[in-house]
Image (cartoon, rainbow, N blue to C red):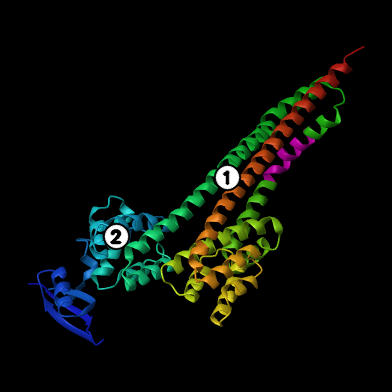
Amino acid sequence: MPSFRYTARDSAGQMIEATLESHSRRDALRVLTARGLQPIRLEEATASGTTRSAAANTSGGSNSTDKVKFTKAEHLPFLQALHELTASGLSAGEAVRLLSLRLKDKNLKALSRAIWESLSEGRPLSQAFEQIPETFDRQTVSLISAAEATGNLNEVLQRLIEHFTEQKEMRQKLLTALAYPFFVCFLAFGVILFFVFFLMPRLQGLLASLGGKLPFATQLLVSTAKFTVDYGIFIFPVVVFALIALWRWRLTEPGRRAIDAWLVRFSLPRSFVLETTLLNFTQVLAVLLENGIPTAEALRLTERTVANRTVQAGLHLATDRVLEGESLSNSLAKTGYFPDLLLDRLAVGESTGKLAPCLRDIAKNYAAQHTRRLHALTNVISTGVLLFAFTFVGFIAYAIIDAVMSVSNSFKF
């Protein structure tokens, strides 16, 4: 019979290290639980006297999770699969074990195995999530921890799924709205390249062979095309290098702080950045408060989800004021990033004790407003690009026709 070495905590909180004989790790865990012990670590002793961790062989054979790099993409699908099983009456541990065996997706199956390995070592679900920070963020871990303490895991999972589904749909709307303007820009750029590198050299040779003085519009067109062909090979690499350098600088903390400060200083990007930030802030804070997270901790978790470093610093100071006893609405008002109407609604929610529902209503209104602005912005961009393309093509046609007419007039006697 296999022998297992374990480390466990008894009801008095004392740590116990001993050896247990059992047919399997599952039976060993059941025996320890029946003795009133909370397993911290469970290892199987091999014939050579060494130990083999339960986490190393839970899934049987080699550990496939070492070959998979977890990402945020597995977050929502895993929560949805987990909720389907726990809603049917299974415990979280049994649900994760089934997912590690039944899921077809390679990444999700590996993620389930990694979580099941942590659960097999006696960790709660929240700590198992915490071991994989590249997939599960801090707010998810905190909510799952609160759900374990209150026993409402299904409800918390449902709210998390709704929250992250809303965020996913918002990102999809943004990408869909920007798809058409990018397509139009691509076509317009293609037309310009076709003219500069294919049509204009032939047209220039034809006009030169006919002789005569070219009109101003044609001269401007020819000069612009010649400049692009002669110096474009130097200008294009410089522009690309500058963009790459700016992007690399943006990845550094000083660069990100500087660019984020610039974004909130100018009116055009400021409105978009603040609207996106306030939408995310109200959504996340509402979810945290609805699931029993204290206001101060919820604010700390929420400020970490804010992408703009300048706004994040302002929210950090606002949280400090809340910890000192100031109301949430007054603290946020001092940041200068929240509109007066939103602050008034927050003050009403605080006074009536319904802050979380108030934040939820505000988030819905901001989501609808954000969608409308995205559609308006994409329409403006699309219209502007189309006007530019049509104007440019019209100018080309006018310059060609004007040149042909001028040359034909020079042939008259």
Left or right relative to 204: residue 264 = left
Any magenta on residue 130?
A: no
Residue 189 % position (x, y): 65, 38
Residue 211 % position (x, y): 84, 22
Q: Quadrant of residue 154?
A: bottom left
Tag 2: Cα neighbours inside 10 Å, few (<14), some, or many (≥20)? many
Left or right relative to 319: residue 61 = left
Determine whether 402 is above or below 243 in the image. above
User: Could you tell me which secondary element the residue under label 1 belongs to?
Assistant: helix
Viewport quadrant of the C terminus: top right
Q: Which of the two residues, 205 or 138, is positioned nearer the viewer here?
A: 138
Magenta: main secondary structure: helix
Identity of the residue drawn at 57% across and 45% down: 178
Viewport quadrant of the N terminus: bottom left
For this orientation, the residue located farthest to the left is 1
- What segment is highlighted magenta in the picture? 222-234
Q: Amino acid at mark 2?
A: Ser
Identity of the residue drawn at 63% across and 56% down: 272
**Which mark, by number, is residue 178?**
1
**Separation (CA) of disc 1 from disc 2:** 35 Å
Disc 1 or 2, which lies upstream in sequence?
2
Residue 368 % position (x, y): 56, 51
Left or right relative to 305: residue 126 = left
Q: Which of the two residues, 365 or 117, is positioned nearer the viewer here?
A: 365
Q: Quadrant of residue 281?
A: bottom right
Q: Which of the two residues, 66 or 176, is positioned nearer the viewer here?
A: 176
What residue would you read off at disc 2?
Answer: 112
